[in-house]
Image (cartoon, rainbow, N blue to C red):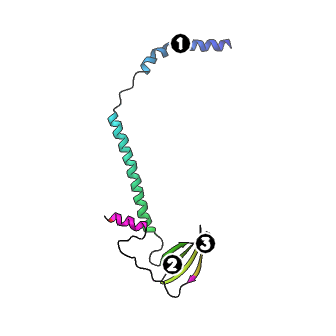
Amino acid sequence: MKTLFASFGALLMAVAPGMLRAAPAAMAAPAPMNTGAELLRVVLSLAGIVAMIFVAGWLTRRAQARVRPGGRKIRVIETMPVGVKEKVMLMEVGGTQLLVGASPSGLRTLHVLATPIVEDAPASPMAPQSFRDILSLWGKR
């Protein structure tokens, strides 16, 4: 045990003077930082990230427009909630109107209408019917 402490002490005495001389050189002041360049780098990085978010949103919207279900053959005319998770939908499929009940357990045809219900015309073209209509009017300006 004494030999171990003696060898460790000898090693420490041999290395310590070199470490003491090297310490001031290692603790030299770092080179001055160009704050203007760093600020420009941070602002450009932030702008790049925001641009990537907008591009991702644009690509997502374009992809959804191509994959949108329904289209010309199946159309939901009106929807009315009748419970927390249940709703009744008036759908048109190939010219035939159906009253369909939707619940967490699935869809069920409630009634097939013999005479189609005629959709009401909007009161005026300037009166928007939904939030989507308001946004589309705002986007056209």
Label 1 Cα neighbours within 10 Å, binned few <14 / some 14-19 / many ≥20: few
Tell me if residue 111 comes above or below residue 106 in the rendering. Answer: below
Magenta span: 111-139
Residue in the image at 53% along x and 73% along y? 80
Of the numbered discs 1 and 2, the one sitting upstream in the chain is 1
Q: Where is residue 123 shown, x and y percent of the image?
A: 39, 76
Q: Nearer the viewer, mark 1 or mark 3?
A: 3
Q: Amino acid at mark 2?
A: Met
Label placed on residue 120: none
- From the image, tell me which residue sits under label 2: 91
- From the image, tell me which residue sits under label 3: 106
Of the numbered discs 1 and 3, the one sitting upstream in the chain is 1
Q: Where is residue 110 shown, x and y percent of the image?
A: 59, 80
Residue in the image at 62% along x and 11% along y? 6
- Of residues 70 and 22, the one drawn nearer to the viewer in this rendering: 70
Residue in the image at 35% along x and 30% along y? 33
Tag 2, which secondary structure? strand
